Structure formats: C-alpha cells, structure tokens
C-alpha cells in the first residue's frame, strides 16, 4: 500500500513524561494516513503514556507532535475536543456508562461532539452498529452484553465522527483468543476503508498472524522494528 500527503501523525524529537519522570526519549516517527501500526513493549515501557500524549491526556513538554492537523505542543485547552473529534479512542476496559443502554452510550458521545439533529443521530447510530456487527443491541444495557459485544460497542462509539485515526490501547486484552480475533478483523475492515489505526497490544499471536509495521517501546526509546513478531 502506498500513502501520500501529510502523515496523520508526525513526531519530531519528542520525549514523553509521566509527571517529572521521562518514560520515552527522543521519538522521531510518522504514521501515514490509512496505515495500520502496532505498538508493543513490556508493561510500564511507555505505550499508554505515548498514546495519552497523542490525544492530550498527558501534556507534551519536549519536542513536537502533529496529529490530525493539530500541533499538540501548542494546542489550547478549548481545541482538545476538536482534536478528539478527529480521533477514535478505544480502551481495554470499555468505559461504557453502566446505567445507559447501548444507544444512549453512543448518543452521549455524539451530543458531546456537537450532534443535535435527532434523525441524523439515529441514522448514524444504526450505521455504526451495523458496521461492527451489532445491528440489534441498541436497547440493551452493557451488563447484558458479552465482553466482545461491549468492545464492539466501544468501537462503534469511536467511529461515530468518522475519525481519520483510531487509537486503541490493548483493545483485546480482556477477551479470549477467538473473540479477540473477531474484534481484530473488525479493525482490519475499518482500516481497509481508509482509517489509520495505532494499536497497542501484547497479543503476539495476532501480530504473527496479521503482520504489520510495529513500533516497540524498549528501554526508554521507540524502535521502528523490522521484525513484527519479535517479543519485548
């Protein structure tokens, strides 16, 4: 696959911090529009800190990062929601609202990102649920769904604003292998439609079966690995 135009992510001479501790040093890399990239490394190696910096949950104190058209070293607080509308963020622990059904969980994000037309919201809800294979669960509560179904709802929620980049932090970490592969194939379909994906994972079986470009957090650095199945 060939890519053209401005990368969706460009990082230049950036260091990533947790409070006063440097966790990753001197990162220089780019992720192109439509690319699929794994992020691997031992627990505590800085994977989640890097992802949190990309969506401005951690501040960037050193270097520069341009993501989805925003320079986050200079980003203003009121611009962060605008950036996040261009990103889909997927967590290992789902973070669904337990007292709201599937539809309301997705509507909550839609309202928070500026949707107001109820007819358009209903149509988009149906679209994203069908896209992840959950066309008939909109009225169910999160506790009525399996773990795999809950993660598909999270993916649907992340797709609402047609993001140019999905950031996924261990999205299959709490799922059994068969369910994990089904979820991963959903990511592949999303990627085929042109959405770039950056996925942190410990699931080396998936990486072996579906090799892609791999970034490894190791000893305070991010290594663009030529061997996608090498274990940290």
Image (cartoon, rainbow, N blue to C red):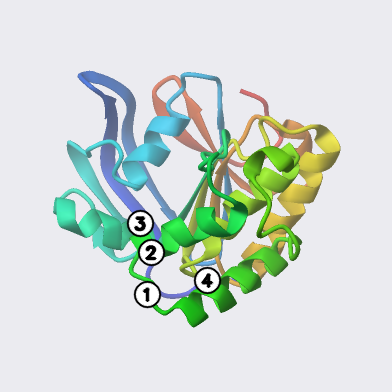
Residue 84's disc is 3
- Closer to the chain start, of discs 3 and 4, is 4
Image quadrant in which you'd find residue 108: bottom left
Labels 3, 4: front one:
3
Quadrant showing the C terminus: top right
- Closer to the chain start, of discs 1 and 4, is 4
Tell me if residue 141 comes above or below residue 230 in the rendering.
below
Labels 3, 1: front one:
1
Residue shown at the point (59%, 51%) measured from the top left: 101
- Closer to the chain start, of discs 1 and 2, is 2
Looking at the image, residue 50 sits to the left or right of residue 121; the answer is left
Q: Return the residue at label 2.
A: 111
Q: Is residue 67 visible?
A: no
- Gap in angstroms between the C-alphas marked 2 and 4: 33 Å
The foreground one among 131 and 216 is: 131
- Gap in angstroms between the C-alphas marked 1 and 4: 35 Å
Percent x, y of residue 165 = 48, 60
């Amino acid at each position: 696959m060939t890519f053209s135009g401005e990368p969706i992510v460009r990082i230049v001479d950036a260091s990533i911090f947790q409070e006063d501790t440097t966790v990753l040093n001197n990162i220089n890399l780019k992720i192109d529009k439509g690319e699929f990239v794994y992020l691997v490394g031992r627990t505590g190696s800085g994977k989640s800190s890097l992802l949190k910096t990309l969506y401005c949950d951690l501040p960037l104190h050193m270097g520069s990062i341009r993501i989805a058209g925003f320079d986050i070293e200079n980003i203003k607080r009121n611009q962060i929601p605008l950036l996040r509308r261009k990103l889909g963020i997927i967590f290992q622990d789902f973070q669904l609202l337990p007292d709201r059904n599937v539809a309301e969980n997705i509507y909550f994000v839609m309202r928070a990102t500026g949707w107001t037309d109820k007819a358009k919201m209903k149509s988009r809800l149906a679209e994203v649920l069908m896209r992840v294979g959950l066309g008939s669960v909109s009225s169910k509560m999160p506790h009525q769904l399996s773990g795999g179904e809950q993660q598909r709802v999270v993916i649907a929620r992340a797709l609402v604003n047609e993001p140019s980049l999905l950031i996924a932090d261990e999205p299959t970490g709490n799922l059994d292998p068969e369910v994990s592969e089904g979820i991963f194939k959903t990511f592949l379909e999303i990627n085929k439609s042109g959405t770039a994906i950056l996925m942190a994972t410990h699931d080396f079986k998936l990486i072996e079966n579906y090799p892609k470009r791999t970034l490894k957090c190791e000893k305070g650095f991010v290594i663009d690995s030529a061997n996608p199945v090498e274990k940290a």
